[in-house]
Amino acid sequence: MSRKNDIRILVVDDEPDVLELIVYHLEKEAYRVDVADTGDKALRMAREQLPSLLILDLMLPGINGLEICQLLKRDPKMRDIPILMLTARAAEEDRVRGLELGAHDYVTKPFSPRELVLRIKNLLRLTEKSADSIEVIEAGPFRMDTVRHQATVDGQALNITATEFRLLCLLASRPGEVQPRETLLRDVWGYEPTLDTRT
């Protein structure tokens, strides 16, 4: 397992007070933190540093957060970087669009720093777990490529969200097993099972 000070997190936001708050809480947890306040700078830093995780605002000067997400997911070197979108855009269509483009989580402002840190820990744990796991999962007509994050059924590509992909991988890798709610919350949605979430 990676030590925290080996984990580099890139925080992208154009609000200095938000950057300061996030950096404070992540450094308190012994993570290495870099910041960018424009989309162009974020993209350049992501390419140069290949961070362990990216916290990304949507509304940025230059390239916006959704465009950054798309560009990262198209690049073979960067497509596996977990992305947590942190933004004031709380509409369902914004959340859905972010997750469809490959964000692993979506948090709206104002936010709880404590909850944000827990979500980051979960994302990093899930990423580390998937790095140690097999690359292709097959179950009947389904085939999931965990490196490329692609799913097919009978050779036809499925157009599914990142969350749906994680759910499909989990269920296919444990055939015939009933999965408890806590497992689904932790391994698919990245929530702590202790949180009172009923969806």
Image: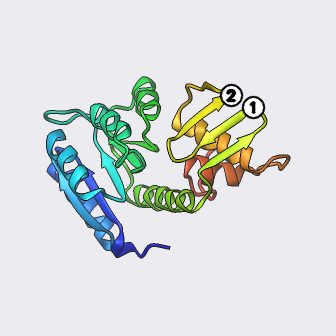
For label 2, the crowd category at 10 Å Cα-Cα, with few meaning under 14, some 14 to 19 and many 20 or more, is some
Q: Nearer the viewer, residue 32 or 199?
A: 32
- Does the image show residue 195? yes
Name which residue type carries label 1: Pro
Tally of marks: 2
* Quadrant of the rendered image containing residue 67: top left
Name which residue type carries label 2: Val
State the residue lying farthest toward the front. Answer: 155
For label 1, the crowd category at 10 Å Cα-Cα, with few meaning under 14, some 14 to 19 and many 20 or more, is few
Residue drawn at point x = 46 percent, y = 30 percent: 100
Task: Tell whether 187 sits left or right of 38.
Answer: right
What residue is disc 1 on? 141
Q: CA distance from mark 2 to mark 1?
A: 5 Å
- Does the image show residue 199? no
Residue drawn at point x = 59 percent, y = 51 percent: 135
Image position, residue 70 (x, y; %): 34, 33
Sooner in the amino-acid sequence: mark 2 or mark 1: 1
The correct choice, above or below, for 67 with respect to 52 in the image is: above
What residue is disc 2 on? 153
